[in-house]
Amino acid sequence: MADKQKISALLDGEELDQSIINALAVDDDSQQTWQHFNLIGDVMRGEAPQNKDWNIAASVALALDNEPAHTGLADISAEPAQVIQLATARETVEAQPTPQQAKRMMPAWLTQFGQVAVAACVSLAVIVGVQQYNGGDEGIVGTPAESQMPVLQTIPFSGTAEPVSLTRDSVRSNNHNAPSEAQVMEQRRRINAMLQDYELQLRLNAEDGSIDKTLLEAN
Amino acid sequence: MRKILVGVVTLVSLMMPLQASAEDSVSSAEALLHQMDEASRELSYELSYILIKKNSIEPIRYRHTFEDGETYAHLVYLSGPPREVIQRGSEVSYFEPGLDPFTIKSNKMVAPLPPIMKSDINELAQFYDFISMGRAREAGVACDVIRIAPKDGARYSYLLWVDTRSKLVMRADLLDRDGEPLEQYRAVSYVVNPKVGDVLRSLKTVELPAVVKLPPQPQAELSWQANWLPQGFESVSRNRHRLMMTERPVESKMYSDGLFSFSIYVSAADNFTVREQLVRQGRRTLHSYLLNDKEVTVVGDIPPATARRVAESVAFVAGKVSASGETTP
């Protein structure tokens, strides 16, 4: 009885006694009581199992007992596995063909053709892909080195300031090794004049209907 | 043997739909460009956009209407000193600080407008691929994105965002060969409404500067020629004149492919001439170099490598009188 009270208390979460837990683990009666109490509780809460075979743990344990054991060497002696004779296996299982046989079955040119075909497919895919991607670059200007040419990035025309820069070594060494300031100024003036004239020409020739709407920002 | 045949047939049949769909998207992109062309020529609209360059952002407003077979358009720079371009039928007037306003007989405004509005799409199709790039949102509306890529690598390409409803250009990026944007036109707001036409009607009565009467410019026979041009570039004009700023006499030829253009200038070399130089300002490239006693300069909206190649292909035709006599400074 004392056990049952303790179990009830444990179930209600009122008491946590190590001794009763040990008893539950060992004692069959206590286990039975624990199960019953749980079942009563379930029924009272309306959570009774639908199936009458609610004692799943017991049935699993039972099933495990009936299960033949498969551990250790003892099992093999008790229930010897079926041994297949090597000779019979050779007859029943289809053997891997030797390379010579395989060759005989497929003509040599065919295997080689297969390899070549795969290679051709890959290269075709690559070529088509590259062409699609590059969109036919036949007319590309110059060599890669040329297209990588360093370029002076100057500030675009905007209102008043129009700085234009030059590479120093590009200036012609015409009796002077370094360009004088006046020279640089003159060159900038010329560049601007050229750009301005281009703008003007664009406008004058726009009538032809074939000129881009280009920027018109020269003053 | 049959297996191989079947394999080959399967491969080919796999390739075909790919090819077909590629062509399909190209043609649909081209059809869209035609619609865009039509819309930007015929609708009445007001487009506010910003032009973004490496070091500057310029807000611009463009109004356009089409009435009685005449185009009326008005482009204004919204910040800084007033700059305007007015198109009235076949006359285009330019108002700029530092220059007297002037009017030119022309049916085309040369101004920072979103590109390829009013270009001949059919002609461009010979030299450019139009590739549909899917959809994106720009200026608050859904847009179809189209790439205009040159078939050769010798010029820049454009990326266009076209409004799915009005078919107007909402954004345009000018890209160089590495895909780096050089310029961007980005619409901020737009209105498609016949009332824009009412606003522009006032242009009919505005007094604009008289049309500049240019002396008839003979298409001069020049003693040089460019032996290499990117495919599709054709000579638009050639003449001899003096530069406005420096009074330097030059001979020039202008070429265009319908979307981009460039000029070749040839002038006499002097002490200031540089052996070789390259200047780049956003989309514009200037490449000049010394050829014998002449300075050859290529200016235009082409990549530096192309400009250089064009400049270096210039050759003087033997037997003809050089213009050096009249171009001595």
Image: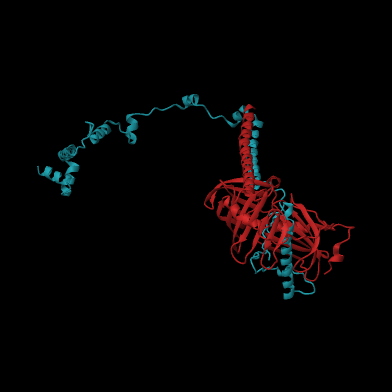
Between A16 and A142, which is closer to the camera in this rendering? A142
Q: Which corner quadrant holds the N terminus of chain A?
A: top left
Give residue A199's position: percent from left, percent from top. Answer: 71, 61
Q: Is residue A194 left or right of residue A17?
A: right
Question: In the rendering, at what x and y percent does residue B119 appear?
Answer: 68, 49
Nearer-the-camera pick, A113 or B85:
B85
Is residue B130 found left or right of A73 in the rendered image? right
Q: Residue at x 53, y 49 (%)?
A: B141
List the single residue furthest toward the left.
Answer: A1
Relative vertical location of residue B133 with respect to residue B302 in this rendering, above or below: above
Spot the red chain and give its letter: B
Name the image quarter holding residue B314: bottom right
Pick the quarter of the image with the C terminus of chain A.
bottom right
- The location of residue B210, given as percent across then percent down, is 73, 61
Number of labelled discs? 0
Residue B109, compared with residue A159, is above or below; it is above
Q: Can the viewer see residue A168?
A: yes
Colour of chain A as rendered: cyan
Residue B25 location, quadrant? top right
Measuring from the top left, give residue B190's x and y in whole percent: 56, 53
Q: Is residue A150 visible?
A: no
Residue sticking out furthest to the front: B205
In this picture the colour scheme is by chain
Q: Image point 66% across, 31% down: which residue?
A: A109
